[in-house]
Image: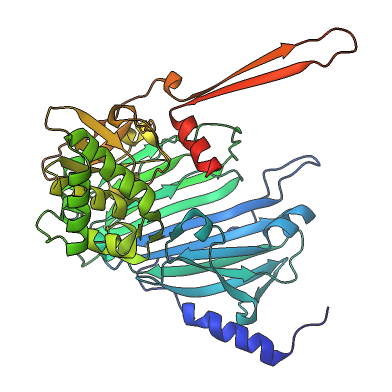
């Protein structure tokens, strides 16, 4: 097809340019030379489609800037077909993007291929289907006229950190990929007085530390070379992280993370809206027993408040006020949990929001303390008699009484309270509590007579909840 008219392309890239700028890298960045003379580490006819010549990450903990510098060599036609574009995802609520260079190395020639007409802005397609709008956008760069043997080098800087973290620094850096890597570096610039904890998983590598001349800043640099590709087994549990990575965190303990969260999750001093007060009183009048009132509160939040998260900027980690969640009748896990806690408080029942990880489950205890260890929030209810009830406010169509609520195995969680000092053990359900039992009975008739098949299916626990959802 012919290229579109210049006016059409200009209009498109004008829209895209609202989300990024171009220019030189920040002064604090230390350039890393690209070595293309080193031969590829592949022999034989079978080769991967892509070879990472360079993966260079540099972060300034003081300015909140992240510089990324990559060089990718295309080895095969399949590699060209599969990887002739790259994307940069960020949150424009607090981040800005500056693209520095996109260079094509072909033999001895180096060509600048940074072309605004080849840049588009996209939004994650599956977000709304999953009930989440996190505000992130992706700058998608389409590379033109790429051939096997070409090396594409590009670098960019993301500026800005989420203000919800109050300037506390933490980061996670990949140390290994599914593709072979020639050179990898992570360089951190920080104040000498800023105390950091580090931990590597799956690789032994230590930083080189040096102080910058005439400055209160220092650099920590991790380097790896000739990193082999890592094969990832299919069907591994989600909490298993096969690729090596580096963690950094300014938090000294889980207690500090809990104290940070308590400031955002505690709405005990907030006045309750009249409409929410009416809802609390309606529950109280409809149910005489406190256990039944607690169950009614759970069912109301689960089934009457739809799941939808608007998680741009600070909202990704800070819940909306319970009154707002009640009025608009939607919220994400954070919003629905604090609303449930507010209703329970109105009924005289104590409860706490607890941060957990759908992805990492029990393995959060192997991670450094930071808010990024968690991706979900649930509720711990403390009944007056001493019983503890755990529930997920985002679940729906749950049946049974208060003691029979189906609850996933999260393994570990962190209570968002000033009194929390460490991770909390979560209840581990019996696999027999969530099952589908099927009994098939065949009644074989005489010759020439029909045979009957009777199927009896019994759903319990989470299986029953899911069936109720499907049938409604």
Q: Is residue 396 left or right of residue 1?
A: left
Q: In front: 197, or 470? A: 470
Q: Residue at x 55, y 45 (%)?
A: 177
User: Which of the 4 image quarters holds residue 410?
Assistant: top left
Above or below, 451 relative to 356: above
Q: Is residue 458 left or right of residue 191?
A: right
User: Which of the 4 image quarters holds residue 169?
Assistant: bottom left
Q: Is residue 370 left or right of residue 173?
A: left
Q: Residue furthest bottom?
A: 7
* Residue 349 at x, y percent in the picture: 14, 40
Q: Residue furthest top?
A: 446
Q: Residue at x 79, y 15 (%)?
A: 451
Tell me if I can see residue 207 in this picture: no
Q: Residue at x 21, y 50 (%)?
A: 282
Q: In front: 126, or 217? A: 126
Above or below, 1 relative to 323: below
Quarter of the picture containing the N terminus is bottom right
* Residue 430 at x, y percent in the picture: 39, 20
Above or below, 183 relative to 229: below
């Amino acid at each position: 097809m012919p290229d579109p008219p210049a006016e059409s392309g200009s209009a498109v890239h004008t829209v895209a340019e609202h989300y990024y700028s171009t220019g030189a890298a920040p002064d604090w960045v230390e350039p890393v030379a690209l070595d293309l003379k080193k031969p590829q580490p592949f022999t034989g006819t079978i080769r991967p489609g892509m070879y990472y010549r360079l993966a260079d990450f540099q972060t300034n903990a003081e300015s909140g800037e992240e510089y990324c510098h990559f060089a990718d060599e295309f080895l095969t036609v399949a590699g060209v077909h599969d990887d002739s574009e790259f994307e940069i995802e960020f949150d424009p609520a607090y981040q800005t993007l500056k693209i520095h260079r996109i260079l094509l190395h072909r033999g001895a020639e180096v060509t600048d291929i940074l072309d605004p007409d080849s840049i588009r802005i996209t939004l994650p397609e599956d977000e709304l289907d999953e009930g989440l709008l996190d505000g992130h956008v992706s700058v998608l760069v389409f590379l033109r006229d790429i051939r096997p043997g070409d090396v594409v080098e590009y670098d960019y800087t993301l500026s800005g950190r989420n203000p919800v973290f109050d300037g506390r620094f933490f980061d996670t850096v990949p140390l290994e990929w599914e593709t072979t890597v020639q050179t990898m570096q992570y360089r951190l610039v920080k104040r000498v007085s800023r105390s950091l904890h580090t931990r590597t998983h799956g690789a032994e590598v230590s930083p080189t530390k040096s102080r910058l001349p005439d400055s209160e800043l220092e650099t920590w640099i991790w380097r790896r070379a000739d990193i082999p590709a890592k094969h990832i087994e299919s069907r591994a549990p989600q909490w298993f992280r096969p690729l090596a990575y580096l963690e950094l965190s300014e938090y000294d303990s889980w207690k500090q993370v809990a104290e940070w969260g308590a400031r955002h999750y505690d709405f005990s001093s907030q006045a309750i809206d009249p409409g929410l007060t009416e809802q609390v009183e309606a529950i109280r009048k409809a149910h005489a027993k406190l256990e039944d009132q607690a169950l009614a509160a759970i069912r109301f939040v689960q089934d009457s408040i739809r799941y939808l998260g608007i998680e741009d900027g600070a909202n990704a980690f800070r819940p909306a006020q319970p009154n707002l969640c009640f009025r608009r009748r939607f919220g994400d896990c954070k919003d629905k949990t604090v609303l449930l806690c507010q209703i329970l408080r109105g009924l005289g029942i104590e409860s706490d929001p607890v941060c957990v990880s759908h992805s990492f489950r029990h393995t959060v205890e192997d991670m450094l303390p930071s808010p990024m260890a968690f991706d979900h929030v649930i509720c711990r209810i403390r009944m007056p008699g001493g019983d503890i009830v755990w529930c997920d406010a985002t679940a729906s169509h749950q049946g049974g009484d208060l003691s029979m609520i189906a609850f996933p195995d999260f393994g570990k969680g962190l209570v968002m309270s000033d009194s929390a000092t460490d991770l909390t053990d979560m209840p581990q359900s019996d696999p027999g509590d969530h099952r589908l039992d099927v009994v098939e009975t065949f009644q074989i008739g005489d010759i020439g007579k029909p045979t009957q098949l009777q199927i009896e299916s019994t759903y319990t626990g989470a299986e029953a909840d899911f069936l109720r959802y499907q049938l409604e």
